Amino acid sequence: MLRTILFSILLLTSLTGKSQNFFDWQYHDRYFSVFAGTGWTGYVGDLTNGKPFTSGLSHFNIGAEARLYSRIAARVQYTVYKLEGSDKNAADSSYNRQRNLSFHSVNHEWQAQMVYYLFKYNKKYYKRRPYEPYVAIGVGQTFFNPKADLYDTQADKIKTYPLRDYRTETDSYGKAAWIIPVDLGVKLAINEFMNLGVDAGYRFAFTGYLDDVHGDYADPNGDGTGYPDGTISSSLSNRKFESDVYIINQEAFDELIPGAQRGNGKFDSYFMLNFNLEIYLPKDVFRSKKGRGRKGKILGKPGAYD
């Protein structure tokens, strides 16, 4: 993970370095900024059941951005976020309610994006517009670990289990998936050095297992017997026998057996509504202490002035 974050930072620096006269113009305006934010997270998958949002503030992010051209910027971001979903939110006596699956998770992601601003850069950061709307798209990875709670009769308490470890479906899955993050937002100038950012982002994930539900019920022997009764794997894979849902939909109850369909087979996705505080870095942040007292000669206009 550390390698991934370092790679993203190097990528941002590389992209910035390719813009016009970078090592000269970076000293004449504040093109670099850092930001941090929080907000609400939701997910779209098999266990959404009309309630996509995770309870309370459910993510935290940090990142950095570099203005490359008049309307183009590059940014990298790291986010920790929570997801949750449950068939208990499904309609009474429905197929999903009888299925009775649930999950919750604390995940993290990294992403690198290109940002397009609808208005041209106003030549000086302190002369920027009061608001700057933008769209962004990029690539990244999410690292996920869905878990579920299960009552342990012997210990007489509820325990939390990592679902991946118990192979609840026929197919196994990894710990990471690629994502395509798309964002729409606006930056509002607070003062000379700070912005308040408001954005909505959608993550297209190349996995159907953010919620541990995607394919068929586990059937390790291939004969419809599933896991032995009473095992943790059996209890987590098929939860139709629990007392609060026992035979509330006879047709669904009969269909929910080892080897049968458990999920819809589609990829999952998630989204974020985010507020962040952005601060412009000093214009000489990358210059050595010895060189900060000297004025650099402008060899040409930076791309952000075009």
Image (cartoon, rainbow, N blue to C red):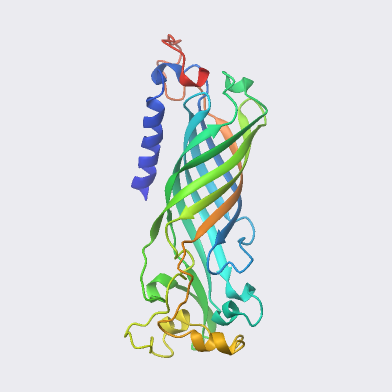
Residue toward you, 254 or 87: 254
Residue 133 left/right relative to 16 = right
Q: Residue at x 43, y 81 (%)?
A: 260
Q: Quadrant of residue 231?
A: bottom left
Vertical order, 21 against 33 (above or below): above
Residue toward you, 298 or 306: 306
The x, y position of residue 228, in whole percent, is 38, 89
Vertical order, 61 against 124 (above or below): below
Vertical order, 120 against 6 (above or below): above
The x, y position of residue 280, in whole percent, is 55, 29
Which residue is at the far front? 251
Q: Residue at x 42, y 79 (%)?
A: 217
Visible in this render: residue 28? yes
The x, y position of residue 240, in whole percent, is 53, 85
Visible in this render: residue 242? no
Residue 212 left/right relative to 1 = right
Q: Residue at x 52, y 39 (%)?
A: 136
Residue toward you, 210 or 71: 71
Q: Quadrant of residue 226?
A: bottom left
Which residue is at the far left? 221
Q: Residue at x 39, y 19 (%)?
A: 23
Residue toward you, 16 or 29: 16
Number of marks in picture:
0
The x, y position of residue 203, in whole percent, is 50, 52
